[in-house]
Amino acid sequence: MNVLILGSGAREHAIGWLLRKQNECAEIFIHPGNSGTLVSGFKSFPKERSETQILEQASLNKIQLVVIGPETFLAQGYADTFRKAGFLVVGPDQVAAKLESSKVFAKEFMQKAGIPTAPSHVFSSSEALKSFSNSHWPWVLKLDGLAAGKGVLVAQTEADVNRFCDKVWNQGSFGSGPHQVLCEQFIRGQEISYIGFCDGRSFVPLESATDYKRLCDDNQGPNTGGMGAVSPSPFLNTQLESRIHQDIIKPLLSQMQKMEMNFRGILFIGLMIDSSGAPWVLEFNTRFGDPETQCVLPKLKSSFLSLLLATAKGELHLLENPVWDSRVSLFVVATTPGYPEYPELGGQIQGLERLSPNTQVFFAGLTKKGTQYFTQGGRVLGLGSLAHSASEARKTVYDQMALLHWPGIHYRKDIGIS
């Protein structure tokens, strides 16, 4: 079977890496991919191709299964297009993808389903949001749309609200609009990324993970697309997982069926576990998480291809539960200076040839010129390792990370500690 993975980041590299490792596919294409995935041996189509041209290339290369990585492709309806053309697709249709592409749609979905989620208000103008008066700080402000992890702010003061309003409505940081902002009550606790294969009737969870969103150690600095992850999550236990399925997964699937959602893809549920042990849904993503995917997939011992095919066909109920490696997986992301707001690109990457083959390296924002590699995106690459303890995995990853260099290289030093 020939498989096409759409996307260009480390998440897509990890998906292709596991499929190739398990050796169940004839050919694996990652499009558009990056210099790192090409050098790693994955094929790609000619660059700068439109949706129609990608479809033509998929047909020419006898692709049978399409796995869609980025949320932008899902929001633009790529899954619909490929399904209509007769391909098996892992990815929800454009309507179901609104669970991620629209924070307001997702909140309304949760409220209708009775899923525990924070109280919220929706604002359509800077004036309305600025005039919102409430003493229960902090509030979480979420732009209603895709913003690559940069459209969320935990507002501690009115000054924070004012700055966010200016960024959204006055400075044009997220385009011309019109814009809506979801203002959500802040819930304190521990975050868990709960991700699974979902076909609208069944949900098969991956191993759990905890993602580190803040740029700097001790959860300081701005939110990012993710600076690292550890799996399994140290905050998940059997009792909590049972509650997640009863209070969240069960009503979620019921609501999908009521709305006749065509959801055959990956569902990412961002959870906050409060001090009483109750799970609250912070967000939905409708694709593999990044960097959770790079952390979790190396633990999968069952057939990855079988899980993807069952998802695409709506046959997850026919599979046995997947088997996972019992070891701890830890993954750390390295970025350019200035990330996430103003990444400085073009720095020469040194040390790749020194990395141990026992460490998983997944490439994202880099390009090759001649024989040299240079940074081309904010998140450049990530390193991961499996070990019998988090401390052992940490030592392996950070020892390897110390071998890498580019001007202003940045990575968190506390992944897997807190």
Image: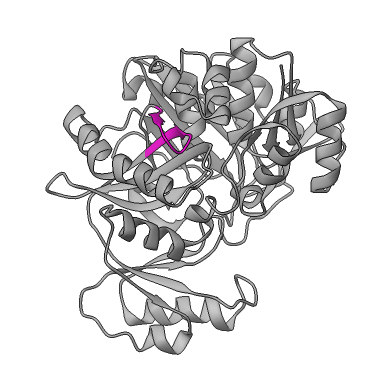
Q: How is the image coloured?
A: one colour
Total tally of numbered discs in the picture: 0
Residue 244, quarter of picture? top left
**What residue span does the magenta drawing correspond to?**
194-206
Quarter of the picture containing the C terminus is top left
Q: Residue at x 38, y 29 (%)?
A: 205
Residue 183 percent across, percent down from the top left: 36, 71
Q: Residue at x 44, y 42 (%)?
A: 268
Is residue 202 one of those drawn in magenta? yes
Q: Residue at x 41, y 66 (%)?
A: 153
Left or right: 126 as drawn, with respect to 178:
left
Question: Which residue is more in the foreground, 121 or 37?
Answer: 121
Quarter of the picture containing the N terminus is top right
Q: Is residue 205 above or below residue 41?
A: below
Residue 217 percent across, percent down from the top left: 38, 47
Residue 383 percent across, percent down from the top left: 53, 29
Left or right: 53 as drawn, with respect to 132:
right
Residue 9 percent across, percent down from the top left: 64, 39
Residue 174, quarter of picture? bottom right
Q: Residue at x 45, y 52 (%)?
A: 259
Question: Which residue is more in the foreground, 412 or 177?
Answer: 177
Q: Main secondary structure of the magenta part?
A: strand
Residue 209, quarter of picture? top left
Q: Is residue 76 above or below residue 186?
A: above
Furthest-left residue in this view? 276
Can see residue 265?
yes
Can see residue 414?
no
Is residue 227 one of those drawn in magenta? no
Question: Which residue is more in the foreground, 389 or 41?
Answer: 41
